[in-house]
Image (spheres, rainbow, N blue to C red):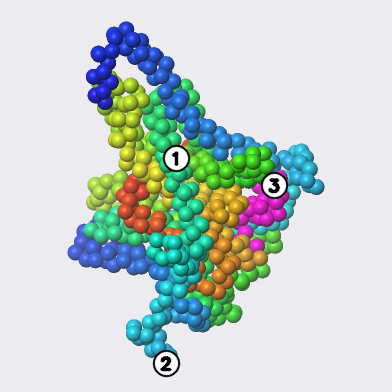
Amino acid sequence: MNSTFASPQMYRARRHLAPWFFNGAMLVICFFVLIPVLATILTSLKDQTDVQRNPPVVFPCDTPDGQFNLSACRWSVEGYTRILEPRPNPNALLGFEYVGRMVSVYLPNTLIYAVSASVLVTVLAGMSGYVFSRYRFRARRALMVGLLAITGIPLLTNLIALYRIGVVLRQTFPGYEERLYVIIVYVGFFLPFSIWVVKSFFDTIPRELEEASFIDGCTPVSSLIRIVAPLAAPGLTSAFLMAFVGIWNEFIAGYLLVGKATLRTAMFGLYDFIGQFVIGYQVLAAGCIMVAMPVIVMFLFFRKTFFRAMVEGALKG
Amino acid sequence: MAAPAGTAPSATPASAVSRHRIEQGFFSRTLPFWLLLPTLLVLLAIQVVPGLFSFFLSTQTFERGEQMFVGLRNFERVFSSSAFNASLFHTLFFLIGYVTLTLIAAFVIAQILNRKLRLSPFYITVIFVPWVLSDVVVGLIFRLFIVPDYGLFSSFFANPGIFPPKGISILTTPAAPPLVSGVPFPPAPALIYLIFASAWKALPFITLLILAALQTVSREVIESAAIDGADGWRTVRHITFPLILPTLIVALFNLTLNGVNGVGLVFSLTGGGPGTATEVLSYLLYTIGFGRLDFGRAAALSVFMAIINLTLILLTLRISRSEREA
């Protein structure tokens, strides 16, 4: 099908009908791509009896005699309330608080890890990306090849060692802070890719601007902060966003390196649900939606930045 | 920006000059070093040292609480185990299915998107949603489809008319008896399902890569090929395909790397099961290392995987560099 429509002759011959054909094809493709997401949203809005029906129903809208009827829909937010677990608390702002582990423990942890690690990644990638883009020195090539080689070490290879190092650190230092360790590990994991993205952004900023600022009396440091950084803001933003989404979604490192239950991540929480809610599929689905929603919204707002960073990072890195 | 220029003349000339010289001399000469230093330290601590430490661990054994040097015995024991043999084949079958399926689907979708339909940005955004989801979420979503009895697709798979002789249940039906002993082929339904879930997740990124490459192919080249009498398939094969080949190779290696290393989806979708039917190399590494706490053998396996990865990356570099020079 594809080969036929790639032909310009055919294309020209069918020019008047081509657009609706391709739009139709894309709409079908989009629908199929979205089926898993839509099905999960529907499941998250069913109640316990409707997720446990055999044969299963897509919409919980059938009447007892098997007819589809919109007014018979039994939508329910039970899945969400079982995750949030609201409890009355006179001291809380709204008179109640959410005590579900996902909202009171796991999601805040993930937010802390993701924000602090991606800020660090952005700052470090900005500094070293600038150096790789602007300076020519003897070790430059070696360092850049090294950066690529590092991306070749599988995550699990490092994690075996990092796990053992973590055990040793915990025994040696009484003030060992697990959160700090996880954050630094995340910085190390996401730094190489971010450096490539940021460097390619710096490459597009003309050097003349900096040279002009030197003539105006700027030192290299003040020129970096006042001239280059604002111009590189889009690049730095994309490095931040990519790292944020990556860390938010990261599972295995958080799972292996965090020992304390109160410091676990949202992805661990979801994974833990599989065993906990063996039959409460609406709870699992609601958990998926809640954990995925922040990054989906983020993506919808900044999609162009994401696209650019991805193509840059993949083709140059 | 204006401040240094404005204050410099008001300071005493001598001190200003010497301060300037110090800054220009010492600072600007060593500035790159200071800017790089934190990055180098972090990468050393989180990537280089642990990588080497894993290499070291692969030569150690931890039996009876004692750490001992055993040379290459961990490698021998891993490579000779039947679990390694099986998971190597699982990984291979997974990769073949995953890479082929994703590349073909992405190529077709990218071709359509490249027609610059007015709604293309909307389509790209919609198609990209799976990319933002984490492996664990994707695994769970696809698991919900096939949970026995209650999953939306489970009755489809359980239908004996479609899947003879008595229907299948993805999470529990084991692989058919192997055609050749020692080679787990045909794979279990769960492995094939895993391929579809992984391809769904990888599709957006690969589509975007191919689309970016397609947009660099000029319309004139395609049209002149058509004037020379090339039909659609020939144009794709002899014009489009060679022109975007470097990107296709980057996509291929990217998929292979992710396929070899990805483990989150196996965790949440099948947990390696049924039995060991979806135990790919990375999951085997996890079970040896963190399930049985046999760090020596896990490290040996991880060194093996690191070698696969580095080879793939070097090949990608080689190919993309030779393309750039050509």
Residue annotated with mark 2: A65
Q: Is residue B287 magenta?
A: yes
Residue at x-position 27% and y-position 15%: B8
With respect to residue B62, does A202 lie above or below? above
Magenta residues, as a range? B276-301
Residue B29 in sight in this render: yes
Mark 1–mark 3 Cα distance, whole angstroms, equals 30 Å
Amino acid at the residue labelled 1: Val
Front residue of B51 and B9:
B9
Q: Is residue B132 left or right of residue A8?
A: right
- Residue A289, given in percent of the width and then of the height, sits at 43, 64
Queried whether the magenta region covers residue A32, the answer comes back as: no
- Give the residue drawn at x 54%, y 57%: A268
- The residue sitting at 45% across, 56% down in the picture is B202
Q: Secondary structure at mark 1?
A: helix
According to the picture, the residue beneath numbered tag 3 turns out to be: B295
Q: Chain of mark 3?
A: B
Callout 1: chain? A
In the image as oriented, which residue stretches furthest toward the bottom?
A65
Q: Are marks 1 and 2 in contact (CB under 8 Å)?
A: no
Query: Which amino acid is tagged 2?
Result: Asp
Disc 1 and disc 3 in contact, CB within 8 angstroms: no
Percent of width and height locating residue A121? 44, 40
Q: Residue furthest front?
A: A90
Q: Which secondary structure lies at badge 2?
A: loop
Q: Tell me which amino acid carries mark 3.
A: Phe
What is the distance, in whole Å, between disc 2 and disc 3 at their CAs? 59 Å
Q: Which residue, given by chain and number where applicable, does mark 1 sit on?
A: A121
Total numbered labels placed on residues in the image: 3
- Image coords of residue A173 (percent x, y): 64, 39
